[in-house]
Image: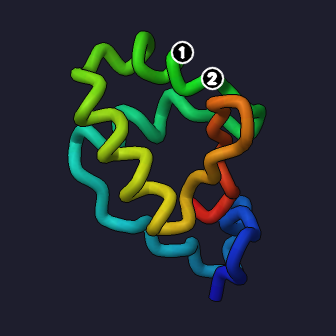
Amino acid sequence: MCPAGAPPPQDDPGVPPCPSPKLTETQRRVYEVITYEPIFQDAVLTASQLPPGEVLAAFTTLELKGLIKRLPGQLVVRTGRA
């Protein structure tokens, strides 16, 4: 079992991997751009090469799934629950 906020277990044969949440192609592209270091939302928009409305919707969904966190100053960061 993966506790909230904890990264999935590494390649330990005795520990089953954490299930990945189901993501759409857009959500997956946005999530792949976001790292464990805070990144500006504008940088995610540029790197993902998706329309702004789709990226903002993906931010909301990813945040609701507990995969990212929005920070002050227009920053986003992974939470480690992937």
- Please, what secondary structure does the residue beneath circle 1 have? helix
Count all numbered tags in the image, as a single digit. 2
* Amino acid tagged 2: Phe
Residue 29 rendering spot, x and y as whole percentages:
35, 33
Q: Which residue is mark 2?
A: 40
Q: Which residue is mark 1?
A: 43
- Please, what secondary structure does the residue beneath circle 2 have? strand
| Residue displayed at 33% across by 34% down | 55
Check if mark 1's residue and mark 2's residue have beta carbons within 8 Å: yes
Q: In this rendering, would 35 be left or right of 64?
A: right
Where the C terminus falls, by quadrant? bottom right
| Residue displayed at 72% across by 63% down | 7
Relative to 4, say whether 57 is above or below: above
Q: In this rendering, would 18 be left or right of 20?
A: right
**Mark 1 neighbour density, 10 Å: few (under 14) some (14–19) many (20 or more):** few
Q: How is the protein colored in the picture?
A: rainbow
| Residue displayed at 37% across by 20% down | 48
* Amino acid tagged 1: Ala
